[in-house]
Amino acid sequence: MILGKVFSPLESAGPLLVRVALGVVFLYHGGDKLGILGPDGFDASIQRAIGAAEHVGFAPAAFWGWALALTEFGGGLLLLVGFATRYAAFALAFVMLIAAWRVHGSSGFSLERGGFEYAGTLMMCCLSLLLTGAGSLSVDGWLAGDAES
């Protein structure tokens, strides 16, 4: 009751915090796959993303590797600024569902054992934004006239 009264004026910051956290994570991983970050450069990085797509059985692997890298990077950027948030969250939740199921699922839950703990957590955070929208502190909120979006 008391905490609700204290923090209710800050409710609009909730989606902002989730968006920023997810945006940074997906920008980092997408940027790594595109060779923007990391020491390997573009060719080696995108080849790793293509190899990951091939490893889980997606064909053509080149298409799916590029789709993965661009979805993570672009989706992360969209989440960070809060533009087209529900669409970005949907796409990224789908990516994380595939990662949790096809890549990490056979290893169980524990991240330490290669399990789906991290991918599953990211997926659930994306689903949260899919349900709530970007919030008023976002480009989506600004375009909607500062209404919750």
Image (cartoon, grey):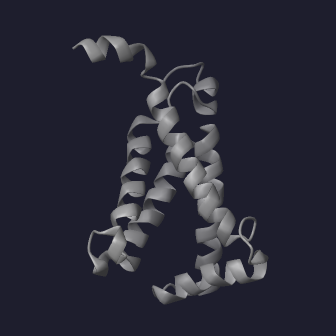
Specify whether 11 is left or right of 87.
left
In the image, 8 versus 88, the foreground residue is 8
Q: Which residue is pictured at 39% across the width and 65% down the height?
A: 97
Res. 48 in view: yes
Q: Quadrant of the N terminus?
A: top left
- Which quadrant of the structure image shows residue 80? top right
- Up-down relation of residue 125 to residue 53 (above or below): above
Q: Which residue is pictured at 29% across the width and 69% down the height?
A: 110
The spot of residue 33 in percent (x, y) is: 66, 71
The spot of residue 21 in percent (x, y) is: 52, 45
- Up-down relation of residue 139 to residue 18 (above or below): above
Total number of numbered discs in the rendering: 0
In the image, 19 versus 118, the foreground residue is 118
Q: Which residue is pictured at 39% across the width and 62% down the height?
A: 118
- Which quadrant of the structure image shows residue 69? bottom right
The spot of residue 71 in percent (x, y) is: 60, 62
In the image, 110 versus 94, the foreground residue is 110
Q: Which residue is pictured at 57% across the width and 26% down the height?
A: 137
The spot of residue 5 in percent (x, y) is: 31, 11
Res. 134 in view: no
Specify whether 51 is left or right of 116.
right
- Up-down relation of residue 54 to residue 149 (above or below): below
Task: Spot the residue most to the front.
Answer: 112
